[in-house]
Image: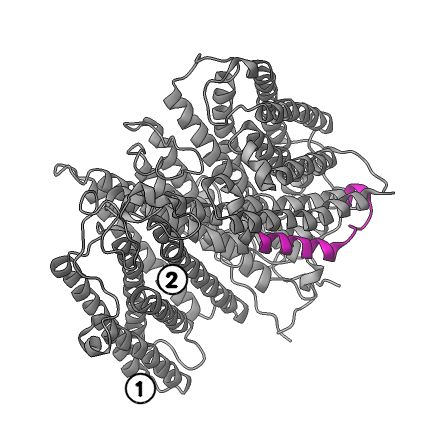
Amino acid sequence: MSAVIETHDHDDHHHGPAEGLTRWLYTTNHKDIGTLYLWFSFAMFLIGGAMAMVIRAELFQPGMQIVEPEFYNQMLTLHGLIMVFGAVMPAFVGLANWLIPMMVGAPDMALPRMNNLSFWILPVAFFILLSSLFMEGGAPNFGWTFYAPLSTTYAPPSVTFFIFSVHIMGASSIMGSINVIVTIMNMRAPGMTLMKMPLFVWSWLITAYLLIAVMPVLAGAVTMMLMDIHFGTSFFNAAGGGDPVLFQHIFWFFGHPEVYIMILPAFGITSHIIETFSRKQLFGHTSMVWAMTSIAILSFVVWAHHMFTVGLPLAAELFFMWATMLIAVPTGVKVFNWVTTMFKGSITYETPMLFAIAFVVLFTIGGFSGLMLAITPADFQYHDTYFVVAHFHYVLVPGAIFSIMAAVYYWIPKWTGNMYDERLGRLHFWLSFIGVNVTFFPQHWIGLAGMPRRVPDYALQFADWNMVSSVGAFLFGASQILFLFIVIKTVMGGKKATPEVWEGARGLEWTVDSPAPYHTFSTPPKVS
Amino acid sequence: MSYQKYYVPDQSKYPIFMAFALFLLVMGASSTINSLDDPESNAVYVLYSGLAVLATTLFLWFRTVTKEHIAGLNSEQLQKSFVFGMGWFIFSEVMFFGAFFGALFYVRNFSVPWLGGEGEKGLANMLWEGFEASWPVMSTPDAGKAFALADKNMSWPGWNHALEWLPMWNTIVLLSSSVTVHFAHLALKEDNKKVFNKWLAVTVTLALVFVALQVLEYYEAYALYGLTLNSGIYGSTFFMLTGFHGFHVMMGGFMLAVMLSRSVFHNHFDSKSHFGFEAASWYWHFVDVVWVMLFLFVYIL
């Protein structure tokens, strides 16, 4: 079977989108579903963010001011769960839906009806999770890592609803990932060999593999919890011969690859943006692919670095320390390639590029604090302090979330046909950049000084930096309202975008009109 | 030199109904489980209605896909998507069982010996002094208090008793069914539908026999040996691993039964086009491999 060569000429059988609400309910179109994912993720980002504001408001001063400790724990737990499963992951899936078929020259995702299902069960899962706030005993209060026995013996009754909502989120991720992998493996335009594939596609191929490998393990973990709580098993209960530490092993076997699930697509996005705005071909495309692959493989053998203080045998402490440090090598290759791409480039600093550069710098800071945490004897000091909070917020907020914002600014002209307001975009960037650093950098210091994480109150010596951190958080939170405004403004109108949008942008998505037609590439383009 | 268009359905109502079904199912299941002590609770009817909507939607959805295939909408490329999709779905199932096998490995090799005072972390023994590690764990650390004691376990009874040992028969039945489903496949490749139907029917029957034997085994465990979910970590791992496997046998057997009825009543499948059957048979082989692992790690070793 070989292809008829035809560029973007697609008026044979197509009609535009259906009218009304059912367009969104019944849709099988990858662009519609991408849009749904992105808006859902934005809503969850604002809800999870509001919870972060509650947390920072309570921590503004020592002592208990605003909420009860029980409610504080619920906010903390839901903030983590919503940001991980509701904001970051769906945003990446939304970007994958919008971009992968266009980038590989496919007519749509491989399994369009399942694509719709993967999206629509997400609101179901989060409706159930959020409804637990109004249940007797309150929402889950055991942290987003839901360690047993906090999440089993001592859990509120709503844990049952939490368990099933995690099952649904997992099903959504698995179906979404199967769709991504099948689309990439089976739907590439003729001539698009694996090594010619854009890096965002590569990053998602690896991410999808990780998701299919670990989401079922998470399902297994919550199933064991369910059985322990309600049906008398003793997986996580030493009195019956089980072990609470077993929970941590299973959870982090999921959890560590999950961390890379939330960063690999960011690597792909950053590579595209830096390439475009440096007006140079990306340095080291092949090494980028191998670096991401190595990171993905290593992610399966480092999980116990989250558990250095539980009492692991010495051999395990050493193995997981060295394996973790090894990850710095491929990560270093990536940072080197980004910097080298910018070297001697004709760089302009539009909003996506600002976010991408901030990503490289701030993600690297998060990576370095990760290296500090990887050193077992040092981790004994840092474990469960605010240093850890600072570390993972540096890789997730100016890491994953900045890359998502960069992607929105970079591709929104392709989605809507309108340019965003560059001045407001830059304002949003600078407010976010300052906000994020003022929020999280001082947390390194209060962590090293000994402030434990997950507490609603703290000793007086931590008061000053906590107040600074809260001020930064309010600034960061408020500037996201500006982001919402910019996005809505761009959707409503603005300067018309050309098909290529950016000078120097490479890739098939820039060969079609802006906004991209409802159906692209019904006949595959020829890739040379 | 022709290009077949990749069929993208315009719109579909099935996914949103399925999402609604999952909503009912999960709300119903959670509320039912949370009110197990409350005889007044009606939550279980929400669960049932979820199941009903789910079953209806699945039936209609699969029927549509089958009809589209018969109408010739599915290009070779699209059929390849189904092949990849099923493969990766089975991989996700492998990882699900992996979590439970991993838990079994961990308790057998690390936490139970440590509780018994052996090895690098044998300090744990001071929690329950006198607890002796052995596998299967017949007497839990807090024997007889929170967790019940079992009289007998399901492990290999020795060659003298091998034939009265149910898992042996289960193994024979399930391994044979993998062979019979392969015979069916071979017959189908030669367009011999009669032989295909025969071997497929034999496979479905073997699936039923397996489930029946497993019911018998569970009955013996609960009624005669006192081995329950509540018998500590051995009962936990035993019932969860064999239980999830048994559930997958039922699903796989059901899929094969659907394929049988499609073949017998609607004369579907020929040597060129039989992906539905093929996918079900892969699933069946997968379930078989899981059983071999179970037989080895849960029963024999």
Task: Name the residue carrying label 2.
Answer: B64
Near mark 1 (Cα within 10 A), the count class, few <14, some 14-19 or many ≥20, is: some
Magenta stretch in the rendered image? A275-298
Q: Which residue is mark 1?
A: B195
Q: Give SS at disc 2.
A: helix
Side (left or right) of B279 relative to A37: left
Q: Is residue B203 above or below residue A520?
A: below
Tell me where residue A357 appears, x and y as whole percent: 73, 36
Q: Farthest residue toward the right?
A: A344
Percent from the top left, x then y, of residue B234?
Answer: 27, 56
Picture quarter with the N terminus of chain B = bottom right
Q: Amino acid at mark 1?
A: Val
Q: Quadrant of residue A191?
A: bottom right
Closer to us: A61 or A380: A380
Q: Amino acid at mark 2?
A: Thr
Dot 2 or dot 1: first in sequence order is 2
Q: Which circle, 2 or 1, is nearer the viewer?
A: 1
Subunit ID for the residue under disc 2: B
Q: Quadrant of the C terminus of chain B?
A: bottom left
Q: Is residue A186 left or right of residue B236?
A: right
Q: CA distance from mark 2 to mark 1?
A: 28 Å
Q: Is residue A467 magenta?
A: no
